[in-house]
């Protein structure tokens, strides 16, 4: 059907819905009270466009799951693209005005195959044979690689090499991660340099700076006076 003029549908208000068939396509338009187009779905040959907003109004697209929870929001008012998790909490924000990508996770992690079968999040890992990683067991180990991400209240912000094979673990190479530490080798203060220890998968404070060259895991962001525990650590390998 070819129509030179659109079919116009009006309701009790003064806004209008227009449907029009065109050569090679068609369009649906919504006009506000003043006659300005605020929403349009148009198709012509190989091009299709969905436009929302205009004339002093903002367009927003919401994608929801079967429970009615918003999964993705394209916000025309704030110029943002927002992704939400299953609980409806914001997980990723792309800020169009600032040009920023904001992530709720605390570290940059990459997935690696780990030699040990049962490696817990928060464990300190070192480089093993064949490019795989293993739980640390030697003090001042210069093969230190990072911390298994996802322990405590923190999760990865960026996850690289994800989904290649099964049996891989995200390892925090930079950023903030919860890490197992052992204060039995010395009380750990905020800002303390950390390295590998003889306690499997645990970091300790650096007591011998010369021995720690190339074996520093990062810095403690919380204190620990005694025993073992998970504490937030700023991973900075050097």
Image: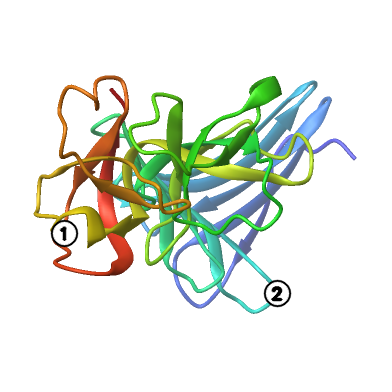
Foreground residue, 3 or 182?
A: 182
Foreground residue, 51 or 200?
A: 200
Residue at horizontal 50%, vertical 78%? 12
Residue at horizontal 31%, vertical 56%? 181
**Which colour scheme appears in the figure?**
rainbow
Q: Residues within 10 Å of mark 1 (few under 14, many from 20)?
A: some
Foreground residue, 228 or 235?
A: 228
Where, by quadrant of the figure, is residue 127 drawn? top right
Decide if residue 54 is in sight here: no
- Frontmost of labels 1 and 2 is 1
Q: Label for residue 24? A: none
Residue tagged 1: 222
Q: Along the horizontal axis of the image, is 110 left or right of 180? A: right
Residue at horizontal 42%, vertical 67%? 89
Residue 115: x and y, percent?
Answer: 69, 41
Please tell me which of labels 1 and 2 falls first in the chain.
2
Which of the image's four quarters has the N terminus? top right
Q: Along the horizontal axis of the image, is 208 left or right of 159? A: left
Where, by quadrant of the figure, is residue 218 drawn? top left
Label 2: state its secondary structure.
Answer: loop
Figure check: 62 above or below 134: below
Q: Label for residue 66? A: 2
Residue at horizontal 63%, vertical 30%? 161
Residue 2: x and y, percent?
Answer: 85, 35
Residue 72: x and y, percent?
Answer: 53, 55
In the rendered image, the residue lying farthest to the right is 1
Figure check: 236 above or below 38: above
* C-alpha span from label 1 to label 2: 41 Å
């Amino acid at each position: 059907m070819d129509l030179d003029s659109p079919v116009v549908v009006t309701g009790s208000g003064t806004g209008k819905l227009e449907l029009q068939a065109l050569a090679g396509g068609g369009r649906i338009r919504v006009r506000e009270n003043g006659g300005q187009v605020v929403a349009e779905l148009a198709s012509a040959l190989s091009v299709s466009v969905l436009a929302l907003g205009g004339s002093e109004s903002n367009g927003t697209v919401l994608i929801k799951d079967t429970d009615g929870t918003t999964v993705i929001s394209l916000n025309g008012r704030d110029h943002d693209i927002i992704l939400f998790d299953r609980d409806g909490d914001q997980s990723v924000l792309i800020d169009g005005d600032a040009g920023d990508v904001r992530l709720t996770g605390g570290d940059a992690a990459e997935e690696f195959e780990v030699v040990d079968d049962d490696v817990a999040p928060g464990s300190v890992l070192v480089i093993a044979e064949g490019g795989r990683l293993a739980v640390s067991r030697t003090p001042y180990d210069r093969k230190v690689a990072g911390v298994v991400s996802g322990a405590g209240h923190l999760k990865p912000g960026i996850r690289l090499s994800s989904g290649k094979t099964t049996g891989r673990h995200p390892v925090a190479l930079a950023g903030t991660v919860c890490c197992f530490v052992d204060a039995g080798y010395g009380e750990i203060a905020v800002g303390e340099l950390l390295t590998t220890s003889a306690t499997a998968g645990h970091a300790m404070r650096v007591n011998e700076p010369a021995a720690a060259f190339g074996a520093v895991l990062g810095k403690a962001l919380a204190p620990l006076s005694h025993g073992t525990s998970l504490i937030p650590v700023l991973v900075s390998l050097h």
